[in-house]
Structures are given as structure tokens and as C-alpha cells.
Image (cartoon, rainbow, N blue to C red):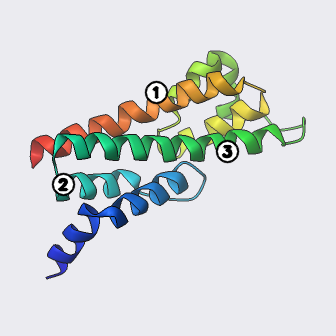
Amino acid sequence: MLIETLTNFFAGDAGIWALCASAFLSATILPGSSEAVLSAAVASAPECSRAVMLVAAASACNTLGSMTSWCIGRFIPDRLPDAPAVERVRRWGAAALFFAWVPIVGDMLPLAAGWLKIKFWQALFWTAAGKTVRYSAVAVTVVHLF
């Protein structure tokens, strides 16, 4: 009964909204498990077109969360202590944001990029690319398992 209820939830529109909320929050400093929500949503209805739509939704919302952190970084005063994320973005530039999906470490990269005044469109491109690759890998794995 519980499994059937959860499957129906994730197979419907509510599952997409739950995925979007989880993906957005997971991109901030708040804890989240958007990969688990994506996996449940894909497993509940593993058709290719639905998986593509779920990956697009998760990628867009997760990128939006990271770009929110980038915006917050723009407003941090100039005197910010050096941190590993700041050093990574200084060294690699906007391309470092490809790894914004990495748990814990990646959450600070958009914030550092905003603080370092990395251009918005460059930050958006690299962040979205990394997150889309990550969610695509999760979805492909789930589709092949189910």
C-alpha cells in the first residue's frame, strides 16, 4: 500500500513539484537529496520522455538554486576570508562551477563565484552544464535498472 502510494505520488505532477523543490534546496547550503527524489520519480515511470523532462526540471531548479547563491555572493562585503572554494574559482574561473553539483564542496562554489564577480552568463552556463550531466547520469542509471 505505501509503495503504491509513493509510486503514484512520484509518477504524477506532485512528484515533479517535489523534485523541483528538492533540487532547488539541494543547491543551497541547506541539505537535500534531489538525486533520491529524481531516482524515485524516474523509477515510478521510466519512460524516456518522462525521464528527459524530469532531468530538465531537476537541472533547471538546481541551477536556479546555485544562481541564487551566486547572487548572494555578489552582496558579500569585499573582505571575505580566503576559503578553498574561493581559491578554486580564482584558479579555474567560471569553469570551476561545472563542479557545483559535488556534495558539500560544490555548494560554496557559486557563492565564491558571485563574490569574485564571475560573469552571470558564464556562471549560468558552467553550473547548468555540470548539473545536467550529473542528473542525466542518475536518470540513465535508474532507467537501466528498471
Q: Amino acid type of disc 3?
A: Ser
Q: Residue at x 46, y 27 (%)?
A: 129
The disc label shown at residue 69, or none: 3
Name the amino acid, label 2. Ala
- Give the residue displayed 59% in from the left and 42% down from the top: 66
Quarter placement of the N terminus: bottom left
Residue at figure coordinates x 84%, y 42% from the top left: 75
Q: Where in the figure is residue 16, as x and y percent of width and height? A: 37, 58
For residue 88, what is the image quadrant? top right
Q: Which residue is mark 1?
A: 129
Q: Nearer the viewer, mark 3 or mark 2?
A: 2
Circle 1: is it few (<14), some (14-19), or many (20+) Cα within 10 Å? some
Say which quarter of the image contains residue 73: top right
Instruction: Verify CB contact (< 8 Å) between mark 3 and mark 1.
Output: no
Helix, strand or loop under label 3: helix
- Could you tell me the amino acid type at mark 1? Ala
N-terminal label among 3 and 2: 2
Outermost residue to the bottom: 1
Decide: few, some or many residues near mark 3? Use Cα within 10 Å; few <14, some 14-19, many ≥20. many
- Left or right: 131, with 112 as reference point: left
Instruction: Compare marks 1 and 2 and give the one earlier in the sequence.
Output: 2
- Image coordinates for residue 144, horizontal then vertical, percent: 11, 40
For the residues labelled 3 and 2, say whether their Cβ atoms are less than 8 Å apart. Answer: no
Residue 59 occupies quadrant: top left
Mark 1 → mark 2, Cα distance in angstroms: 24 Å
Q: Nearer the viewer, residue 8 or 98?
A: 8
Mark number displayed over residue 43: 2
Q: CA distance from mark 3 to mark 2?
A: 30 Å
Against 140, is 90 above or below? above
Q: Residue at x 23, y 72 (%)?
A: 6
Element on which disc 1 rests: helix
Q: Residues within 10 Å of mark 2 (few under 14, many from 20)?
A: many
